[in-house]
Image: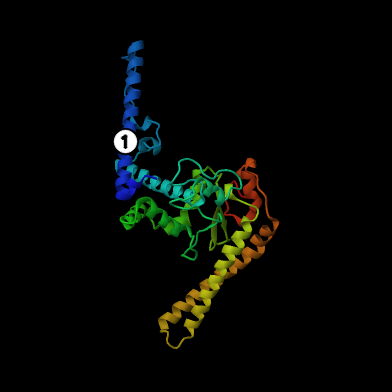
């Protein structure tokens, strides 16, 4: 990790990167046109060919004219490139959360089957941003766990670009992707990840039927007891926290000191929590408990398509990948 990044904003860093990409694209265009001139001159084709190469034929993914073919304005192209770059930054952050990548060392860190946090710490004894210990990162509508994915991303942003510009940097990301980061993780991240890896995701999402519970794991760090960790340390713990919240609201709903509005809001939330708790109970009983007792083994050599189906309805459905 370059500590100089902490002395500037994410916006300024992106602008510097964008200028570098533009220079690369223009240099590639210049070289291709120069090659064309040499070819045309060598074979006397001046009357048949021209050396010019349009920008949309410069095949670099950092070139928005090539990457987003179609009739779009410069502003639209720049917005799309920024949008995708920020999503790539978020994806990299999640990779650092799982130990696939690290800020302190280039390349892949944990990429072999069954590797653990101990294997990570052998390579990076004092990480500036530590990978998740148990390979389970909850992705919930609210900060119910200390290793919640949104909270971990906040920390990642502070570590990478510093505390001084943290709020400005977060706003820059959220404006680029068009929503707050927690909503992005809940609504879009996994679909983007599946698309990025062409329906062969390396992060798998344990998700209850209506999506009230979500927990992400990294398949390379999967162990036969991983489902038990999801069940015992996260699903049951989350359900217990929801039940405690419901008990508190029930006390509010009958409290003499609570206003009519407070009681109404409490009753409304109680009904919502009842439905979620029931959903989680069904998910545990019908899906996760049996899977946890099976201690399912996977083999990375078999590929995602074979292994993903072993978990049935426990994982978020992916068309063309999930078991029918």
Q: Residue furthest right?
A: 294
Query: In the rendered image of this protein, does residue 95 appear above or below residue 149?
Result: above
- Residue 37 or residue 126, whichever sits in front: 126
- Residue 222 or residue 102, whichever sits in front: 102
Residue at the (39%, 53%) spot, across then down: 159
Quadrant of the rendered image containing residue 182: bottom left
Residue 172 at x, y = what percent? 33, 53
Residue 93 visible in rendering: yes
The number of numbered badges drawn on the structure is 1
Residue 52 at x, y = what percent? 31, 24
Q: How is the image coloured?
A: rainbow
Which quarter of the rendered picture does the N terminus lie within?
top left
Residue 73 visible in rendering: no
From the viewer's perspective, is 296 left or right of 141?
A: right
Other residues around mark 1 within 10 Å, as few (<14) / some (14–19) / many (≥20): some
Quadrant of the rendered image containing residue 167: bottom left
Residue 176 at x, y = what percent? 35, 51
Q: Secondary structure at mark 1?
A: helix
Residue 260 at x, y = what percent? 42, 84
Residue at the (42%, 53%) spot, across then down: 156
Q: Residue furthest bottom?
A: 256
From the viewer's perspective, is 214 left or right of 33?
A: right
Q: Which residue is mark 1?
A: 22
Query: In the rendered image of this protein, does residue 188 appear above or below residue 29?
Result: below
């Amino acid at each position: 990790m370059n500590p100089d990044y902490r002395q500037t904003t994410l916006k300024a860093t992106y602008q510097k990167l964008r200028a570098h990409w533009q220079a690369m694209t223009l240099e590639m265009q210049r070289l291709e046109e120069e090659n064309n001139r040499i070819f045309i001159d060598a074979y006397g084709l001046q009357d048949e060919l021209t050396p010019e190469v349009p920008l949309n034929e410069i095949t670099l993914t950092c070139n928005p004219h090539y990457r987003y073919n179609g009739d779009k304005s410069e502003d639209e192209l720049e917005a799309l490139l920024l949008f995708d770059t920020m999503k790539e930054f978020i994806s990299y952050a999640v990779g650092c959360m799982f130990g696939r990548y690290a800020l302190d060392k280039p390349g892949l860190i944990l990429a072999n089957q069954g590797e653990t946090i101990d294997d990570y710490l052998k390579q990076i004894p004092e990480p500036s941003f530590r990978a998740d210990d148990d390979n389970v990162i909850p992705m919930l509508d609210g900060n119910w766990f200390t290793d919640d994915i949104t909270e971990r991303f906040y920390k990642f942003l502070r570590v990478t670009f510093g505390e001084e510009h943290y709020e400005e940097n977060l706003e820059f990301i959220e404006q680029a992707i068009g929503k707050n980061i927690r909503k992005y993780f809940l609504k879009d991240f996994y679909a983007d990840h599946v698309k990025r890896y062409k329906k062969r995701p390396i992060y798998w999402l344990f998700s209850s039927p209506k999506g009230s519970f979500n927990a992400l794991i990294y398949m390379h760090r999967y162990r036969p007891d991983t489902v038990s960790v999801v069940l015992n340390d996260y699903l049951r713990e989350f359900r217990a926290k929801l039940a405690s919240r419901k008990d508190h609201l029930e006390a509010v709903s009958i409290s003499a000191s609570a206003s009519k509005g407070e009681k109404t809001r409490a009753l409304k939330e109680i009904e919502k929590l009842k439905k979620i708790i029931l959903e989680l109970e069904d998910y545990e009983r019908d899906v996760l408990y049996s899977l946890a007792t099976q201690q399912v083994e996977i083999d990375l050599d078999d590929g995602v398509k074979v292994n993903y189906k072993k978990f049935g309805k426990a994982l978020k459905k992916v068309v063309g990948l999930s078991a029918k």
